[in-house]
Amino acid sequence: MTRLIFLGPPGSGKGTQAQILAQDLNIPHISTGEILRQAMQEQTPLGIKAQYYVNSGELVPDELVQDLVQERLSQPDTQSGWILDGFPRKVTQAVFLEKLLAETDQNGERVVNLDAPDDVVVARLLARGRKDDTEEVIRRRLEVYRAETAPLIDYYRDRQKLLTVNGDQPQEEVTQELRDLIAS
Ligand code: AMP
């Protein structure tokens, strides 16, 4: 049973790695950013509420993402495990998730912190060219990451759930390190 939370700055490669591992393990890759972008594209009520925040690099209000994660983690395909990518992104969300997992008997989650220096992540984001990857929005997303998300590293370290992998290496090497970690 693999339940993994991916932490790391935007551009650390966590989305790519989460997708590869989820495929390997045949478990769902749950990316809150992807779910939000899809909802925006379809202009669902969730998408309409989220778009201002996503397009400016701000965090979407907790309630919106928490509801969508709660709903997603109640789907039958999550019975055999999951990888969460992009959630939690702040301590309040981590507290919410901890409670949700306890209530639904889904424990034993581990947290992977995929680390990479700022200059590396900025270069990768600029090369990626997603709609919210303009220089200004990237700068804001990094600020938000440092202020809101990076504290989760200590949060999970204190709870002895944290694993750290160097994201500043070729993609295949990161994948191999992750496979070894998960198997151990
Ligand atoms: P990502 O694809 O993970 O880089 O997420 C893209 C954008 O979606 C972020 O910049 C936020 O605006 C929003 N988002 C994704 N996950 C969350 C979350 N857990 N909490 C708040 N906003 C989020």
Image (tube, helix red, strand yellow):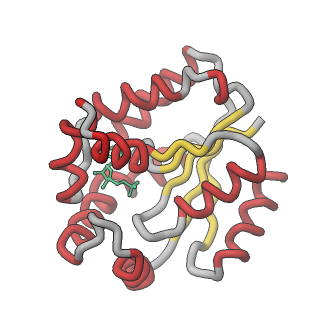
Residue at horizontal 43 percent and vertical 36 percent from the top: 94
Residue 82 in the image: above or below residue 121: above
Residue at horizontal 43 percent and vertical 79 percent from the top: 124
Q: Nearer the viewer, residue 184 or 85?
A: 85
Residue at horizontal 81 percent and vertical 61 percent from the top: 180
Residue 64 in the image: above or below residue 88: above
Q: Is residue 90 visible?
A: no
Q: Quadrant of residue 18?
A: bottom right
Residue 102 in the image: above or below residue 5: above
Residue at horizontal 62 percent and vertical 62 percent from the top: 17
Horizontal side of 30 relative to 66 (left or right) equals right
Residue 40 is situated, as x and y percent measured from the top left of the image, at 28, 44
Residue 168 is situated, as x and y percent measured from the top left of the image, at 56, 79
Q: Nearer the viewer, residue 12 or 127?
A: 127
In the rendered image, the quadrant that contains the N terminus is top right
Residue 101 is situated, as x and y percent measured from the top left of the image, at 56, 24
Residue 85 in the image: above or below residue 8: above
Horizontal side of 82 relative to 9 (left or right) equals right
Q: Is residue 170 visible?
A: yes
* Residue lying farthest to the front in this orientation: 42
Q: Quadrant of residue 79?
A: top right
Q: Nearer the viewer, residue 171 or 7?
A: 171
Residue 23 is situated, as x and y percent measured from the top left of the image, at 71, 51
